[in-house]
Image (cartoon, rainbow, N blue to C red):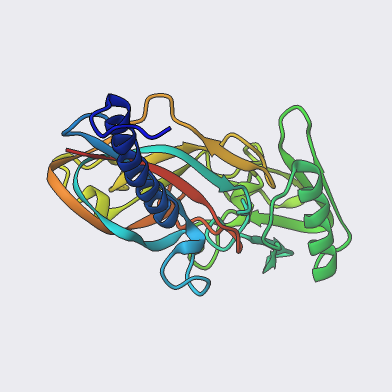
Amino acid sequence: MTLSKECPFYKFGILFAIIQVILNAYILYTVQFGMLVSKADAVHESVTVMVNSRNRVGYPNTSPATMSYILPEAIERVSKITVLSVQIPYSFYSVNAFTGYQFYYKVSGTSHSVSFEHGNYNLANICDTLKTLLDTAGFGAPFTVTYSPITLKVTISSGSNIQVLASAGGDTHPMSARLGFTADSAVGTSVTGDAPVDLSGPPVILITSATLNKYQTTVPTYGSITNIIHTVPVNVGPSGVIVDIPQHPAPIIFNNRQTITGFDLYLLDETGREMLLNGHEWCIQFLFEIS
């Protein structure tokens, strides 16, 4: 059956075909560039962008925790940006070069030190590791290293007079302090830390961006750390994946509409030190609002 050009169904078919062509072109665009454009009305739009650190500038020869990212295509008339979700692997170590890994002590008045391997420890294996390190060093060996399950304090014993030093040589993050020796211990054949052992990793991970914050009147801070765009609570242990889907995210609101071509992203601990992900990647999802 052939429809007359005057038939309403004929005109509807032509209109439907035109809409289908436009829709297919739209889908091709979103698949190609990885950005979903949802049109709320004639004025306001939104673009969802998933950023994987693997797509950073200089991969794999740059750190995923200090990355620059270039968008496949510039996003114009951006008025607001919101973090929708973040995934970060717990591949970082609580004991590392930044947090401290040197243990300082004296045996019969002579200073010594041992170095912990970078990694994540618990109360039991940190004591076993310390005993092995001290015995291997040989000064005052053999040692006994125990802990109280009630006070979580470590006791170190030797056949010689020993003293644990809270710091030495200008080291501001010694392992001694993390093992509960926040001040130099007394001298004796058995010494106990003055504080509980603290082997915890960072309580939060700070995501910062100078680029995305430069158009705001008020730039978010965390203590003395500036350019915060999101704070991720560390809610899993080592080898897990930290997943944060904020229920009430605080958007980045621009003073004026901006064209965004790319941006920087940094992962920092609560003290402002770079998070060392040890070769693993992370991702973040943004919502760019356009008006």
Q: Nearer the viewer, residue 223 or 108?
A: 223
Q: Nearer the viewer, residue 207 or 282?
A: 282
- Image point (32%, 48%), residue name: 225
Is residue 108 toward the left or the right of residue 236 in the image?
right
Is residue 235 toward the left or the right of residue 64 in the image?
right
Residue 244: image location, x then y, percent: 51, 35
Please determine whether, in this image, residue 285 is positioned above or below residue 105: above
Please determine whether, in this image, residue 116 is positioned above or below residue 78: below
- Image point (19%, 53%), residue name: 259
Is residue 283 toward the left or the right of residue 261 in the image?
right
Is residue 162 toward the left or the right of residue 282 in the image?
right
The quadrant of the rendering that contains the C terminus is top left
Residue 167: image location, x then y, percent: 55, 58
Please determine whether, in this image, residue 25 is positioned above or below residue 7: below
- Image point (38%, 40%), residue name: 230
- Occupied quadrant, residue 200: top right
Residue 187: image location, x then y, percent: 69, 52
Examine the rendering and report whether any part of residue 64 can be seen.
Answer: no
- Image point (76%, 50%), residue name: 126
Q: Nearer the viewer, residue 32 or 50?
A: 32
- Occupied quadrant, residue 41: top left
Report the label total: 0
The quadrant of the rendering that contains the N terminus is top left
